[in-house]
Amino acid sequence: DPRIAAGTNLFIGFFMGSLGWVGHATKGEVDYPLLVMMGAAAMIGSYLGARLTGRVSLNSLILTMGVVLLVVGALLVVRGIFN
């Protein structure tokens, strides 16, 4: 079920991100304005995700995740070619 996978992925991402932050913080390499922006975006996304849980069909969720992955993949390929 993609909904369970998304929650598991969020947990693992938070855990790994926290470890990465600790590593950078000990070296004084934290971009705090970026941290605040990303944190705010994550809170908004979490809130909207919780509100939409059960309201979005499984097929719509799978389609949306697929489109997002294709777009991000295409952007990475273009970035790799032109940089």
Image (tube, helix red, strand yellow):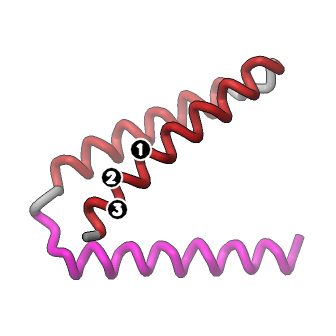
Question: Taking 20 as reference, is 62 above or below it?
Answer: below
| 53 sits to left or right of 1 | left
Q: Residue at x 63, y 27 (%)?
A: 33
Instruction: Give the residues in magenta.
Output: 55-83
The image position of residue 14, as x and y in percent, is 49, 39
Residue under pointer 3: 5
Disc 1 residue type?
Phe
**Lateral position of residue 35 relative to residue 15, left or right:** right
Dot 2 crowding, Cα within 10 Å, few <14, some 14–19, many 20+: few
How far, Cα to Cα, is label 1 from label 3?
10 Å
Q: Are marks 2 and 1 in contact (CB under 8 Å)?
A: yes
Residue type indicated by callout 3: Ala
- Badge 3 crowding class, 10 Å Cα cut-off, few under 14, some 14 to 19, many 20 or more, is few
Q: What residue do we see at 54% from left, 28% from top?
A: 36
Q: Is residue 73 magenta?
A: yes
Q: Is residue 80 left or right of residue 49?
A: right
Q: Which residue is mark 2?
A: 7
Label 2: which secondary element = helix
What residue did someone put label 1 on?
11
Q: Amino acid at mark 2?
A: Gly
The image shows residue 10 at horizontal and vertical percentages of: 41, 48
Residue 24: x %, y % from top left: 75, 27
Q: Quadrant of residue 25?
A: top right
Q: Nearer the viewer, residue 45 or 58?
A: 58
Quadrant of residue 74 within the rendered picture: bottom right
- Do the residues bearing badges 2 and 3 touch, measured as CB atoms within 8 Å? yes
